[in-house]
Image (cartoon, grey):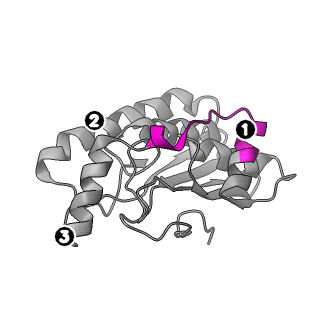
Amino acid sequence: VVHGGAGSKAAREDEPLYRDAVTNALLCGVAELATSARSAVVAAVSYMEASTPLNAGIGAVLADDGTARLDAGFMDGATRRFGAVADVRRCPTPVRIAAHLASDGRYGRLLVGEAAERAGVDAGVASCEPERLVTERARERHRRALSDSTAPGTDTVGAVALDASGHLAAAVSTGGLSGKRAGRVGDSPIVG
């Protein structure tokens, strides 16, 4: 199961973009499901992080300082481990860092900002300059949000999978609230 923002208030003209992104994320997850539920949810959410209309990864809504600051969480039912990151500015796929934290306890389970980004680099997760995460579409949404508190917004993306072995996994990723205070940790990386 995938969602591209279960509570989103997307503009009607954007609906086809969201539907395509969610459909393609589902296909990515299904392609990995034979490997594991873990692989399936990471693949699906990573796709949505790379799909700019959604509020995760590249193109996520912007914080009050005009930067993309990303949160992500991963939960593995088979091991009952989790990993989470917040305030990530240099990684287009923070869910991959969160999944790594769930499997490698040396770093801790919840990391914020530069610590999360360093763990991602150590794990071989792709990093980027912060500007790469900010799209013109995100800048325009940011301008609208600053001038109109009722402007359309989007929501957290996520995936849940149950594999043939009976293992369950879930993952979420978000840019948080448009115009949020830089450094804010939202609810997405908080387990429970």
Q: Which of 30 and 136 is in front in this view?
A: 136
Other residues around mark 1 within 10 Å, as few (<14) / some (14–19) / many (≥20): some
The residue positioned 26% from the left and 67% from the top of the image is 146
Q: What stretch is highlighted in magenta?
A: 118-133
Mark toward the start of the polypeptide (2 vs 1): 2
Between the residue at mark 2 and the residue at mark 3, the CA separation in whole angstroms equals 27 Å
Q: Where is residue 95 in the image (x, y as percent from the top left)?
A: 59, 46
Residue 3 in magenta?
Answer: no
Residue farthest to the right, as pictured: 106
The three-letter amino acid code for the residue at tag 2 is Asp
Residue 131 can be seen in this image: yes
Residue bearing mark 1: 121
Q: Nearer the viewer, residue 83 or 93?
A: 93
Above or below 93: residue 109? below
Query: What SS does tag 1 mark?
Result: helix
Residue bearing mark 2: 20
Left or right: 120 as drawn, with respect to 48: right
Q: Position of residue 19 (x, y in %)?
A: 26, 41
Residue 120 in magenta?
Answer: yes
The three-letter amino acid code for the residue at tag 3 is Asp
The residue positioned 35% from the left and 40% from the top of the image is 52
Mark toward the start of the polypeptide (3 vs 1): 1
Callout in the foreground (2, 1): 1
Mark toward the start of the polypeptide (2 vs 3): 2
Above or below 29: residue 12? below
Left or right: 150 as drawn, with respect to 126: left
Residue bearing mark 3: 148
| Residues marked 2 and 1 touching at CB (< 8 Å) | no
